[in-house]
């Protein structure tokens, strides 16, 4: 039953994105397209999976000023767990291969999100510079998975510097969003997915910091997130 729920949840993604494509074509590259689509996808997916997502500290996500949001990345199902937490005018940073996903790739591009080809470092650097400008000049928030890849619930991976360079260069605060470890376990009868607890940590201001402060900033964020994830994860 759990497999059926997961299949149906992911089957709805291109359907929802196809509907969302109408909105994106009506207002192309509007970052609020991402917020609308994120809510639709997350609510629909959690409903089908039977997934509960208790959350602490949602009110700490800035709504009226740009922020760099960082979260731990475990599975593709993070879309359902975290997709409805985007504040207004938020773009995300993702792998360039996402552009080829049917319908999802098109709405992702039309949402003004940043696509990075990590195999070409000069393109990745240029993309992150554009992200910093978007925060400073266009008053956009940016969502980044600082690990750069999925951990599959095996612990918090090493952080890459891109998110922290963007935050320090723009002076935007960092908002840390932590999800407890999950593996997609389901109940035997109903196939409902196990609950995933999420916590938003208090923002960490970066105003006045320089590039020299980035290593310490990364370590502080990682330590805080690792401690929170441990508390949220099932024993």
Image (tube, helix red, strand yellow):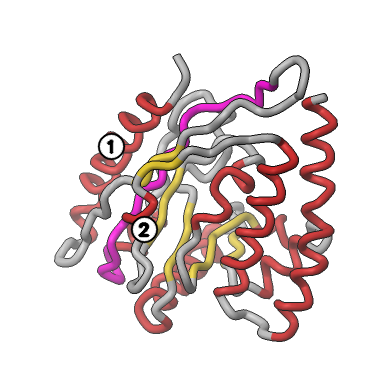
Sequence order check: which comes first, mark 2 or mark 1?
Answer: 2
Q: Residue 58 at x, y = what percent?
A: 39, 51
The mark closer to the camera, 2 or 1, is 2
In the figure, 65 relative to 101: above or below? below
Q: Residue 92 at x, y = what percent?
A: 54, 62
Q: Quadrant of the N terminus?
A: top right
Q: Is residue 177 magenta?
A: yes
In the figure, 106 relative to 189: above or below? below
In the displayed structure, does residue 200 sit left or right of residue 33? left
Q: Which mark is residue 193?
A: none
Residue behind mark 2: 61
- Badge 1 marks a residue whose secondary structure is helix
In the displayed structure, does residue 2 sit left or right of residue 143? right
The quadrant in which residue 135 appears is bottom left
Residue shown at 69% from the left, 22% from the top: 186
In the figure, 235 relative to 2: above or below? above
The quadrant in which residue 137 appears is bottom left
In the displayed structure, does residue 43 sit left or right of residue 131? right
Q: Is residue 82 magenta?
A: no
Q: Which mark is residue 224?
A: 1
- Badge 2 marks a residue whose secondary structure is loop
Separation (CA) of disc 2 from disc 1: 16 Å
Residue shown at 19% from the left, 62% from the top: 210
Few, some or many residues within 10 Å of mark 1 (<14, 14–19, 20+)? few
The quadrant in which residue 132 appears is bottom left
Q: Residue 160 at x, y = what percent?
A: 42, 47
Q: Quadrant of the C terminus?
A: top left
Residue shown at 63% from the left, 46% from the top: 80
Q: Are marks 2 and 1 in contact (CB under 8 Å)?
A: no
Q: Residue 14 at x, y = what percent?
A: 82, 57
Q: Which residues are magenta?
A: 168-186
């Amino acid at each position: 039953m759990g497999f059926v729920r997961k299949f149906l949840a992911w089957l709805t993604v291109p359907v929802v994105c196809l509907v969302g494509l109408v909105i994106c074509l009506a207002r192309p590259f509007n970052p609020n397209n991402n917020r609308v689509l994120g809510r639709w996808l997350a609510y629909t997916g959690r409903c089908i999976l039977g997934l509960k997502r208790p959350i602490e500290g949602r009110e700490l996500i800035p709504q009226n000023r740009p922020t760099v949001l960082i979260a731990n990345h475990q599975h593709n199902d993070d879309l359902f767990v975290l997709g409805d937490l985007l504040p207004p005018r938020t773009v995300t940073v993702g792998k360039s291969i996402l552009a080829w996903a049917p319908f999802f790739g098109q709405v992702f591009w039309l949402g003004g999100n940043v696509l990075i080809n990590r195999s070409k470092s000069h393109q990745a650097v240029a993309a992150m510079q554009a992200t910093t400008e978007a925060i400073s000049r266009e008053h956009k928030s940016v969502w980044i998975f600082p690990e750069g890849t999925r951990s599959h619930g095996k612990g918090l991976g090493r952080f890459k510097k891109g998110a922290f360079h963007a935050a320090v260069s723009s002076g935007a605060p960092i908002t840390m969003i932590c999800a407890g470890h999950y593996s997609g376990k389901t109940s035997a009868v109903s196939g409902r997915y196990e609950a995933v607890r999420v916590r938003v940590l208090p923002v960490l201001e970066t105003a006045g910091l320089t590039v020299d402060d980035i290593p310490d900033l990364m370590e502080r964020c990682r330590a805080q997130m690792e401690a929170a994830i441990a508390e949220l994860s099932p024993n």
